[in-house]
Amino acid sequence: MKALISNDDGITASGILASKKAVEDLCETYVVAPELQQSGIGHALTLYEPLRINEHILKDKSKGYGVTGTPTDAVTMALFEIMDEKPDIMISGINTGFNIGKAELTTSGTLGAAIEAASFGIPTIAISQEVTRDDIKFENGENQVDFSFAGKMLNKLAKIVLKKGLPEGIDILNVNVPENPSDDEFEIAHLSERMYLPVIDKRLDPRGKPYYWIGGEQYEKHGTGSDGYALTKGKTTITPIKIDQTGNIDSLREWLE
């Protein structure tokens, strides 16, 4: 059994090492991730710049590979350059900070890496953990987040995936772990509307010309049964994701008549 482990926080992030530790008793692990922090890059692919693969000695003295591109680039390099065969499972994370809601499917680099692997038929888990300190969400390298509980839940879920594969019609399991869990069970939940509402911060440079920072405010309107709602109750959530986003073809035909 082989596992590909990637992320969007970078090859030296604490969360990716926690993922490796969580599943290395189950299978051989390959750690291939962006060289640097790539949060919010989504499913982007580098087409206009060359890419490099740099070997890293991780904190546990094992070898990993840093790719000078996006999470999607890292997965592509892993599958078609580094590994000699398709892995039995792909894990993206453990991400520093939640990835919940419909908007995260296209903006999250964690989900971007997961979608790329799943598009090749690889059973995939994307896993993220709540952090209450905003200043560490986009840090490069190590942080002080305790990923031990998330690692325990990942190990439990990976065992099932390696034994059974994923259920029919499911390509990715999107897992979110609260900072203070109420129990060690999974709760199946649908996607919230979104995680953040965009906030545009307009500023002026020394010459008086405007420039902008895109930020966000926490979205609080999580409906019952959603990932956001369950996480407020201290539950670890699983949301099944399908890559095929085709809408209702029959309703479109009727609409066009």
Image: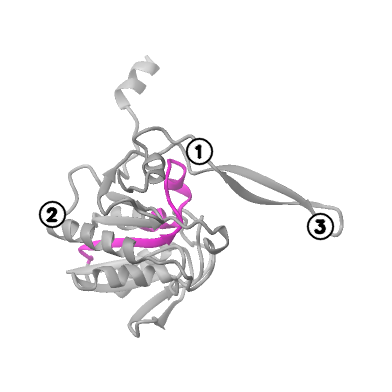
Q: In the image, is 147 to the left or to the right of 88? A: right
* Residue farthest top in this picture: 257
Which quarter of the picture shows residue 222?
Answer: top left
How many labels were placed on the picture?
A: 3
Residue numbers of the magenta segment: 86-113
Q: Could you tell me the amino acid type at mark 1?
A: Glu
Label 2 amino acid? Lys
Query: What is the quadrant of the C terminus in the image?
Result: top left
Q: Position of residue 132 (x, y in %)?
A: 50, 56
Q: Nearer the viewer, residue 139 or 69?
A: 139
Depth-wise, is mark 1 or mark 2 nearer the camera?
1
Q: How far across and how far down the image is residue 165, in percent?
A: 16, 54
Q: Secondary structure at mark 2?
A: helix
The span from disc 1 to disc 2 (Cα, nearest Å) is: 36 Å
Of 149 and 97, the residue lying toward us: 149
Q: Is residue 97 magenta?
A: yes
Q: Which residue does the numbered mark 3 point to in the structure image?
A: 205
Among the two numbered marks 2 and 3 on one chain, the one whose residue lies closer to the N terminus: 2
Does the magenta run of residues contain 17? Answer: no
Q: Residues within 10 Å of mark 3 (few under 14, many from 20)?
A: few
- The way the protein has been coloured in the rendering is one colour
Image disc number at residue 164 = 2
Residue 133, given in percent of the width and then of the height, sits at 54, 59
What secondary structure is marked by label 3?
A: loop
* Number of residues whose C-alpha sits closer than 10 Å to that of mark 2, classed few (under 14), some (14–19) or many (20 or more): few
Residue at left offset 16%, top offset 69%: 1
Q: Residue at x 47, y 70 (%)?
A: 144
Say whether residue 83 is visible.
no
Q: Are marks 3 and 1 in contact (CB under 8 Å)?
A: no
The residue at 34%/35% (across/down) is: 225
Q: Are marks 2 and 3 in contact (CB under 8 Å)?
A: no
User: CA gap, disc 2 to disc 3?
Assistant: 56 Å
